[in-house]
Image (cartoon, grey):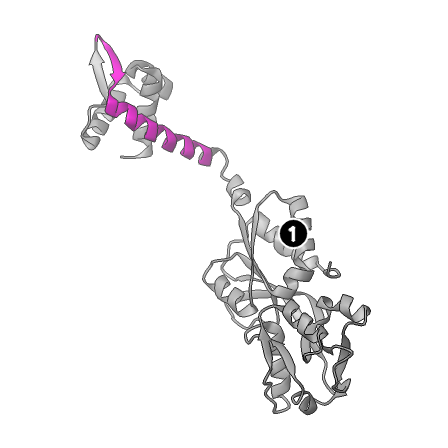
Amino acid sequence: MNLRQLSIFCAVCEEMSFTRAAKRLYMTQPAVSHVIAGLERETGCVLFDRISRGIHLTGAGRAFYEKAARIVELMGDLERSPGELDFASPLRIGSSITIANVFLPDILHAFSASFATPVSVGVDTARHNTERLLANEIDAALIEGAVTDSRLVARPFSSFTIAAVCAPSYPGPRSVSPTALMRETLLLREKGSSVRELFDSAMMLHGLVAKPAWTSVDSQALVAAAKSGLGVSILPEVLIERELAAGELKRVHIRGMQLKNINYTVYHKDKYLSPPLAGFLEIAGRSKGGARR
């Protein structure tokens, strides 16, 4: 059974005549009759009653027509508008947490101004977004920190400074060496997050390993803990601009160390870049982000 047979069957149903269907399809009447007879053999059902030199759908024929007509209509839609499929399919985007807070809203606003394509977003760690890209579970990702997998294309689009901060009431010093920082009560992101990996790598260069009192997947939980005077947190400055400006948090200078994360648009090197996906990557590549709202 194939689409040609179904199209001929539907034409016969709509014309209720082998002769008129043949004329409409630029076929001979015997050829149309042969196709219908073949369908009846394949389905094991009589699809038409031949009564008084006319044809009428049987009960099985009516049920078969309902299904066949939907198939033929869907195929017609595909043939008439193949290019529209690129724009109708949802774009699946992964994002790191800080990027989702600072950059992604403006990127999506600019994207929606040019494309009607729906977008679904999943916010996760850089490591998990990388895994999802490799599994083709998302189309592209906005990731903080270095991307080393050769199967992925990573293009930098922005960066932000990572700061050590604490509450004004916190009793620790405001300028410390990396070694002295390890003696403070540390409030850190979880392992696997780009901020944590950057911090741990910087500490390893000094032969140090952080042993945090707190770990959290939620940066805002760390902001709240630091504001409460519970310890020193390592956070992207773009997330705490408001708290720093209001004096709710103070910077702790780490002598001889400056931490900066670079943000990347990332996609699989073998990924088909549909017009919406290419447009999203271009818009994201121009983004510089904005202040936290």
The residue depicted at 30 percent of the width and 35 percent of the height is 2
Horizontal placement of 11 versus 153: left or right? left
Horizontal placement of 13 versus 252: left or right? left
Q: Position of residue 41 (x, y in %)?
A: 18, 29
Task: Give the residue number, with chain letter if any, for mark 1.
Answer: 108
Horizontal placement of 280 versus 56: left or right? right
**What is the tally of numbered marks visible in this picture?**
1
**Relative to 169, does residue 128 appear above or below in the rendering?**
above
The residue depicted at 68 percent of the width and 87 percent of the height is 181
Q: Is residue 269 magenta?
A: no
Q: Which residues are the magenta region?
A: 52-78
The residue depicted at 22 percent of the width and 9 percent of the height is 53
Indicate the amino acid at tag 1: Leu
Q: Position of residue 122 (x, y in %)?
A: 55, 58
Query: Residue 23 falls in which quadrant of the image?
Result: top left
The residue depicted at 53 percent of the width and 45 percent of the height is 86
Does dot 1 land on a helix, a strand or a loop? helix
Q: Main secondary structure of the magenta part?
A: helix
Q: Nearer the viewer, residue 179 or 106?
A: 179
Q: Nearer the viewer, residue 118 or 269?
A: 118
**Relative to 258, does residue 143 appear above or below in the rendering?**
above
Q: Position of residue 106 (x, y in %)?
A: 70, 54
Q: Is any atom of residue 261 visible in this view?
A: no
Q: Is residue 63 magenta?
A: yes
